[in-house]
Image: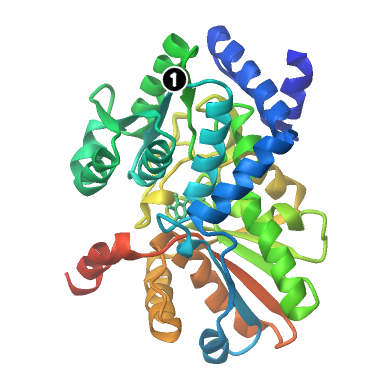
Amino acid sequence: MSKAVETTGYFGQFGGSFVPEELQEVLTYLAEQFEQYKQDPEFQEELRYYLREYIGRENPLTFAKNLTDKLGGAKIYLKREDLNHTGAHKINNALGQILLAKRMGAKRIIAETGAGQHGVATATACAMFDMDCVIYMGAEDIKRQALNVFRMELLGAKVISVAKGQGRLKDAVDEALADLVANYLNTFYLLGSAVGPHPYPTMVKYFQAIISEESRRQILSKEGKLPTAVIACTGGGSNAIGAFAHYLEDAEVRLIGVEPDQAATMNEGVPAVLHGFKCLVLLDEEGNPRPTYSIAAGLDYPGVGPEHSYLKESGRAEYVTVTNDEVLEAFQLLCKTEGIIPALESAHAVAHVCKLAPTLSKEDILIINLSGRGDKDVEQVFHMLRG
Ligand SMILES: *Cc1c(COP(=O)(O)O)cnc(C)c1O
């Protein structure tokens, strides 16, 4: 059994589960429970209910007419994850995992967060489902993200400061995993991106695949044909894998992931094990994960989901980089042309489309996955533009 589960956790050479034995038992059990509930009609019904009534799905696939006219070339559509409750795609996954946790009898949810966005999504879902919520966060990150810490506390979560190591995301992950091993009987570890050991990348993709389930149906109904390309930013890779999932078999649809040139995991990474799974990783000369830098906190991660690593290796998806200047330009362009302030993460996808659209014809269709709204980034952009 554990063998079968293990092989399903691989995408080519990537993925798997490289964790201590006691943690492996917990993950194997989780994988079995996920496979079981995924096929349970009552679970499906409950998931669909909350996607609709709480998150507000389905969200629109908006034709960006002004942006299209401005750039000239391909027709551009925006998949509006920014319109979800809490303003980004992360809630899709938090909701799905909470419903699974509830069915598994968990009373307590733990998660780790770097910039705080996943912590806020988790705290939101925990408030809704009356679960105890503990968020591990590096001491350094807590200092920088005071407002997100307060948000999580308003939502009823307990934020635990991790001072060990460098007081960053990696140290928070270690603490959360230790908590899980000690308390797995009543505790569920809610992971925020399509990363980590099996079954997390598979599970997170499953819950985020609603994005492309909707967009594929929407584009066929609006245009009567599939898009030329789907474009999404890649941090850990959850919004991108969700945006790509239902097009993977459509060989004619190009799938394009966009990353910051200073956190270019897909373009400069090498196969290595990070945080319990194998993926492309940015390493320094000594073979340690290299510090990354991105103006978008959600893209600041030296690894990437195993399935993206595989999609790159197999050639099914393309991964490109954009510069901070291009992102800031695209951010402002979307504000001015469409009246939409995008998250800085999502502005990476817009930035690539600014280059791609003019090279295509007006018969071509591009779908940008607008992973989140930019209210959270306005102050930072103010300092970058006026500072
Ligand atoms: C967290 C976040 C991302 C990056 O995470 P992925 O797992 O790569 O999707 C992108 N956009 C927004 C708005 C985010 O909050």
* Callout 1 amino acid: Leu
Residues 70 and 135: in front is 135
> Which image quarter: residue 73?
bottom right
| Quadrant occupied by the C terminus | bottom left
Query: Can residue 318 be seen in the rendering of this structure?
Result: no
| Quadrant occupied by the N terminus | top right
- Residue on which the image places disc 1: 177
Q: How is the image coloured?
A: rainbow
Residue sitting at x 57%, y 8%: 21
> Which image quarter: residue 131?
top left
Residue 190: % across, % down = 48, 32
Residue sitting at x 60%, y 11%: 25
Instruction: Classify mark 1: helix, strand or loop.
Output: helix
Above or below residue 387? Residue 179 is above
Residues 287 and 225: in front is 225
Q: Is mark 1 within 8 Å of ligand 1?
A: no
Above or below residue 78? Residue 358 is below
Residue 381: % across, % down = 27, 67
Residue 2: % across, % down = 73, 14
Above or below residue 282? Residue 357 is below
Residue sitting at x 41%, y 15%: 178
Residue 254: % across, % down = 73, 64
Give the left or right position of residue 331, taking residue 46 as reference: left
Residue sitting at x 22%, y 70%: 382
